[in-house]
Amino acid sequence: MITAQHLTKRYGDRAAVDDISFVARPGRVTGFLGPNGAGKSTTMRMLCGLTTPTSGTSTILGKPFRALPCPGRSIGVLLDASAQHAGRTGRETLALSARLMGLPAARVDETLAQVGLTDQEARGRTRTYSLGMRQRLGLAHALLGDPAVLMLDEPANGLDPAGIRWMRDLLRGFAAEGGTVLLSSHLLREMEAVCDDLVIIGGGRVLAHDSAAALLSGPSTRVRSEDDGALASALAGAGHDVERADDGSLATTAATHEVGRVALAAAIALTELRAATTTGLEQLFFDTTAPHGREEISA
Ligand SMILES: Nc1ncnc2c1ncn2[C@@H]1O[C@H](COP(=O)(O)OP(=O)(O)OP(=O)(O)O)[C@@H](O)[C@H]1O
């Protein structure tokens, strides 16, 4: 579990993070989303003790990060996969951390296998690694101490499509075993596929925080009829939410067959009936962050 309570970070008179509170729960992948400069990295750095908050608190597994006896065994962190010692091999990088964490040397081979780095790749110096290999090594580093919590900033950057699918399966498996995952990424389709919960921030503030199902569900049927007012009343009377959609049709939570049944009972002729696609994460992201995004620069 990760909790952030009223976290705030000011640089000069500007708040990079402004009173952010959220919870990332065990057994769930929580997506942390926002436009460039929204404050995601700053928040993550505060959660793992790299940046001191101006105010507010946070906990990992119920304790402030700095009170964790051996942080790497509680939380695996991947903030910047490029920040690896260029002159060390992948294996040396992991072996050194394993020693510092008091882990058996065998753990290095286990995590290398877990992230799909071959023995030959692990013997190469990290300066020769592709971005995707760096991400795998960074993830191996995060997994090394067998933590219950993972916090990953843009881990899918540089991964090829197979690598992205592999990462998705790994994170889903980690959560299925009761782990907590806090994940930031700009790959919205991927976030939609992997996340159970979403925290969307903009301008340093939380704009939305709920389960992905709740945030992405919406009226799923669109209908027009010869008497929309009467149909709206009949649908509401049958316990369904109804609102006027942007295109002028009625948007309702009732399934199409239920709309048909209600309309028949009320003797209202339908002129159009369709199942609308649910709100995609991309649309939700733009709708939620629109006032907080970066301004377009026109040529
Ligand atoms: N050390 C610092 N000094 C001054 N301002 C900073 C510092 N670190 C971050 N900021 C500012 O805080 C704001 C939030 O930055 P942050 O890196 O947390 O955003 P982000 O959501 O991670 O963005 P991105 O998606 O581009 O990675 C930005 O305006 C950034 O310029």
Image (spheres, rainbow, N blue to C red):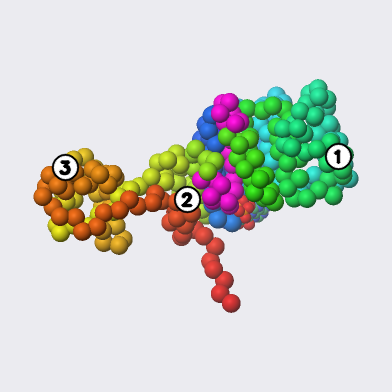
Q: Residues within 10 Å of mark 1 (few under 14, many from 20)?
A: few
Q: Residues within 10 Å of mark 2 (few under 14, many from 20)?
A: some
Q: Amino acid at mark 1?
A: Gln
Q: Residue at x 78, y 38 (%)?
A: 117
Compared with residue 207, is residue 118 higher up or lower down, i.e. above or below? above
Residue closest to the eye, 39 or 222: 222
Compared with residue 146, is residue 251 higher up or lower down, i.e. above or below? below
Compared with residue 16, is residue 65 higher up or lower down, i.e. above or below? above
Q: Amino acid at mark 2?
A: Leu
Q: Residue at x 60, y 40 (%)?
A: 168
Q: Which residue is mark 3?
A: 237
Q: Is residue 175 magenta?
A: yes
Q: Earlier in the sequence, mark 2 or mark 3?
A: 3
Disc 3 secondary structure class = helix
Disc 2 secondary structure class = helix
Q: Quadrant of the rendered structure where residue 46 is?
A: top right
